[in-house]
Image (tube, helix red, strand yellow):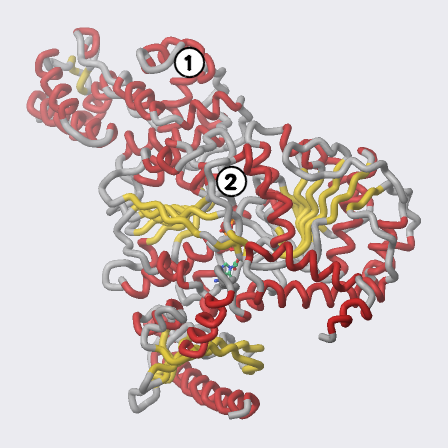
Amino acid sequence: MPKADELAREQAYLNHARQIREQKRELRLDGTGAKANGHRRGKISNEGTRLSDSLGSPDAPVAIGRVVDSDMSLYIGHASVRADDGRMLVINWKLPAAEPYFKANHQNPLGLRSKRTFKMEGHKLVDFEEVVFKALARQVAALESTVKEPFQGPDGSLLQELDYKRSGEMRDIVRTIQAAQYELITAPMDQVLVIQGGPGTGKTAIAMHRVSWLLYNLRQNLAPHNVLVVGPNRTFTRYIKGVLPSLGDHDVRHVTVADLAPSITVGRAEKLETIRLKGEARMSRLIRRALSLKVSPPTEATVDGLRVGARPLRLTVDAVNLAFRTALDQRGPYAIRRRSLADTLSTLIHHEARDLPAAVRETTAQELTERMWPRVTAAGLLRELFATRERLSSAGEGDFSDEELSLLHRRPRTSVTEEVWSQADLALLDEADHLIQGEPNKYGLIVVDEAQDLSAMQLRSIARRSSSGAITLVGDIAQSTGASARDSWKDVLANLPRKQLHKVEELKYGYRVPRQVYEFAAPLLTTAAPEVAKPAVVRIGPADPGLHHVTREDRARTAVRMAQSHAGKGRFVGIVCADSCRAEVERELNEQEVDWRDADQGELGSSINVVSPHGAKGLEFDSVIVVEPAEIVQADPRGERLLYIALTRTTKYLEVIYADPAVRHLNLPAEPVESPREKVLQEVSKDQALASAATSTPAPVPVATRPIRSRPTPLVESIAQALADELRQKAAETVKETIYAEVVRRAAELLAEPEAEQSSDGS
Ligand SMILES: Nc1ncnc2c1ncn2[C@@H]1O[C@H](COP(=O)(O)OP(=O)(O)OP(=O)(O)O)[C@@H](O)[C@H]1O
């Protein structure tokens, strides 16, 4: 059947399924809310909304694709749609029956004849990609007989999907989940599962879809409020927050690891050694001992002078000591054992002063308790511990050297409420709170993103919130930075409970970063993370990285102009800059009256964003401007990893702006600065949206851009670009990876040769 007819047939089916879906939605909303009143109506209409949500968003296409096996065809969508006669018009992607859609391939078609992936614009089916498994197997066999290692390129739907314009909110990938990703999404929940993968391999996407899939398939045992998603910072949490609701899952708690601690004021800066030390697991012993040193058995002085009302207390030290020992021998948190001691003392006092009011007896019991077992809070305990050298020495004896204790020692503020804490203190406060108050809220499933950076103390914080040990960690060792940077997942796993099986799975394909950009960034791994396998990149980008050698004075101006140029083309832009040049970049943005957002403050605007290399983790932009890579490297012991992170945030364009070309492993040409302002002005004038910005006469900006070619006219440039994109795309689909570069180079040579020469063999 001609494709146009097929499209029309599919569209009719989709229209029908959508009509049924919307009828059901109306019924659910009306049927549950109409007849009730007040509070009840509120409750019922919530139920109606929940039922309606289970149909997916009314804006979502009713189906994402379709599979056909020998005797039936199944449409797959975000939610199931059942006709009144019981027929499934569309099945939810999370149902086991949908598995072949994600897993079938030419080697193992899983009983399928074909699979279609729909390309939708709103509710309109504009195209579909069809894989007929038998035909594909034949083609592959034919190819294999001629080529040793056929290129298994990504399918067109995936490439299209990856090409969408980013906006600062992650979106779901249901339509194009790849088989290896599906395996991890659906892997058993009851394990500590580590998903390791290079930048853009889909770890975050997998983590979110895994939550949704498990919530659906284990709904008898796992409710949304039993799931905790932990991210590295607020910006990231906001970036991913929309994914689960778009998959129909509301009420899952998203937090940063800092949110797990008791609420206090954070703002203290600390030395790297102190942060590192505070992250170590032995800090838990220090805190435990500090807490145990708070209690002391009774002596004569303890009971001395105490009164019950107007009478002296007649309890003996032995009697009080017995109560103390009993509380000490109990298991459980400090506050609970304190309560138990106070209760016993209250009973003892009751016996000797029955005639006095209960409140009077209680006051004495509390006072006596306080003398042996003082009331304490996490903040109070740590403030006192860090403030006193003697306490630190007693609590840390045998475990910490004098130098280490000096790192922990600090002057306290006048009161505990005025105390300002560091980020590294947060996990310590949580540990102390746990020892004092007892278990925090527990979760059946915990998912942790960017887990490679977490300290042992932070991991303990997370682990204690797991009710069953079902934890999924996603991250990349090559992107591990910060005070607790790691070179292996073993170090992470060592800090997690062994209640469950521990497993590390690796993702092999990079979906975000274009090949030209990845090839430019990957050499950094030579020393940054030599053990980590590089992902195979599936896409070719629209352009090579732009490398711009400028003077120090001009780097901010160049960065801002580049950012404006990209933003003017409607792109979502991230300027990732070294801390040392942050102020100058911000000043320039403000002077140019550019509308920009500070992504380190939890904000992502839809146009230009500035972000530190640390803050950039997990984020992605259409265009990334990296400013002064050498300083990114120098500023941190894991600077090469930070630079690798910065360079791999782009889905399309990368511009590197540098005054200092000396970055190990990075091919930054140190060509003499030339052609001062034309290059930048040319960029700006190409962009009509920036016409107004270009009218204010900018000062000359010296830039050397590699490769330095003769400058084509904008028309030639855009036609050539489109042609090159097309050729690259074609090559990626047909040429195996190992010879890709060579084929492209040769094709370029052939193109450059005069036509007569090429056709001289008569072809
Ligand atoms: N199967 C897929 N279909 C469509 N898009 C995909 C797929 N897999 C990944 N992507 C896209 O690739 C991009 C990178 O994914 P994601 O952010 O999950 O990667 P990551 O491994 O977490 O990266 P990083 O290590 O940088 O944090 C996202 O835009 C995501 O939507």
Disc on res. 479: 2
- The answer to whether residue 721 is above or below residue 8 is above
Eye-nearest disc, 1 or 2: 2
Q: In percent of the image, x 77 and y 71: which residue is there? A: 760
Q: CA distance from mark 1 to mark 2?
A: 30 Å
Three-letter code for the amino acid on which mark 1 is drawn: Leu
Q: Residues within 10 Å of mark 1 (few under 14, many from 20)?
A: many
State the quadrant of the C terminus: bottom right
Q: Residues within 10 Å of mark 2 (few under 14, many from 20)?
A: many
Three-letter code for the amino acid on which mark 2 is drawn: Gln
Which sits in the foreground, 522 or 126?
522
Earlier in the chain: of badge 1 and badge 2, it is: 1
Does the closest atom of ligand 1 sit within 8 Å of the Cβ of label 2?
yes
How far from the left and from the top, in percent, is residue 131?
A: 46, 76
How far from the left and from the top, in percent, is residue 547?
A: 74, 44
| SS of the residue under disc 2 | helix
As drawn, which residue projects farthest toward the left?
351
| SS of the residue under disc 1 | helix
How far from the left and from the top, in percent, is residue 607?
A: 69, 56
Q: Is residue 30 visible?
A: no
Which residue, given by chain and number where applicable, does mark 1 sit on? 405
Position of 680 with respect to 613 (left or right) is right
Q: In percent of the image, x 37 and y 46: which residue is there? A: 194
As drawn, which residue projects farthest toward the top?
300
